[in-house]
Amino acid sequence: MIKNKFFIIFSFFLFQTFLTNIGAVEPDEVLKNNAQELRARNISKNIRCMVCQNQSIDESEAPLAKDLRILIRNKIKSGKDDKEIYNFLTSRYGDFILLQPAFKLNTFALWLLPVFFLLIGVYVIFRQNKLFKRKS
Amino acid sequence: MKNHLLKIPFIFFSIILLIFFYLLIIERNPTDIPSALLNKKVQQFETSSLFNSQKFNSSQEFDNNVVLVNFFASWCKPCRDEHKFIKKISEKKNLKIIGINYKDNPKKAIEWLEKLGNPYSNVAIDRNGEIAIDWGVYGIPETFIVDAKGIIKFRHVGPITKKIYKKINLLIDEVKQ
């Protein structure tokens, strides 16, 4: 019985893992060259679907996401490198289209503030601990 | 010293709360993304025109004119809703209006314009959505105001409402000066 339960739970998590790898890419979109297709998938995973906004274009079934996936593949086929493709997309849709924003002058607070807050937290806990120990 | 330290996280937390509260109460649409193309030159493109067999060449169409560009389709319900405002702009303002027919059946688009009226001086066909991507469009209808130098001065995502219509009118006058 316990074994059975374990098997069901294990299967559920295994299924979940597969689900996260399922994209919205349709068979007719897939490039014949595996290396190029892998590049396209990697770029697509970091491009926000401007319609759904909380999904990448790799996962989204919105028509615009499909258009962007095709555009990325066409650019890869025509010999453009990843940087050129990212530059094209951000020049049209802004940095918002990147799911992982670049480290820039106007985004450094976004990247560094969490670390800053964490350090303050650690400092406060450390000081409190020291004071508490001294008192007791 | 002890009380002082304990205040720090509380102050930071309050600041973050205040920022969130401010963003909640101000009038803004979080799904509305500012165009990356504002104050930049329009993207040049060549395609076919909806009404005639001639090519649609954007460099000729945007030449030294203030232009209102409207992405629309006959299958798009909000486009139908905003159409009366586009017509009003074409009647009241001495302005060139260019339509970009997005992923549509040309036959249906022509029928649609014959039925509702055609405010456009020319309509470009964007068969596969490439022109829209080049303009950073993500949800039609979308409307742009381009000045006489070919610079994008305004962009609106979604249908033109009464409020947006008034704003566009003011902006057209401003851009024309």
Image (spheres, coloured by chain):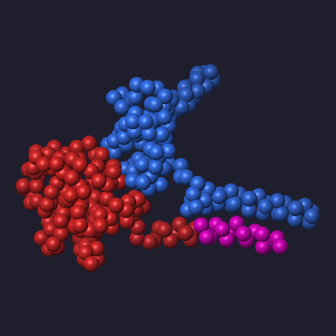
Q: Colour of chain A?
A: blue
Q: Which residues are magenta?
A: B1-16
Asked if residue B8 is among those painted magenta in the image, a careful observer would answer yes
Residue A85's quadrant in the figure? top left
Query: Which quadrant of the rendered structure holds the C terminus of chain A?
Result: bottom right
**Residue sitting at x 16%, y 48%:** B55
Depth check, front residue: B80 or B18: B80
Residue B33 at what x, y percent from top left? Answer: 40, 60
Q: Quadrant of residue A132?
A: bottom right
Assign the N terminus of chain A to one quadrant of the image.
top right
- Does residue A113 appear left or right of residue A43 in this picture? right
**Residue at 78% across / 69% down in the picture?**
B5
Say whether residue A105 is left or right of residue A117.
left
Question: Which of these two is toward me, B163 or B119?
Answer: B119
Q: Is the magenta region chiefly helix, strand or loop?
A: helix
| Numbered label tally | 0
Residue B108 visible here: no
Determine the residue positioned at 9% across, 49% down.
B52
Task: Using the image, determine if residue B35 lies above or below residue A34.
Answer: below
Q: Nearer the viewer, residue B110 or A78?
A: A78
Q: Is residue B15 in view from this perspective?
A: yes
Instruction: Give coordinates of residue A25: x percent, y percent.
Output: 39, 33
Q: Residue at left 63%, top 23%?
A: A2
Q: Indicate the position of residue B151 as horizontal and vertical percent values.
A: 32, 65
Q: Is residue A3 above or below residue A112?
A: above
x, y percent for residue A111: 61, 56
Chain B's colour is red
Magenta-colored stretch includes residue B96: no
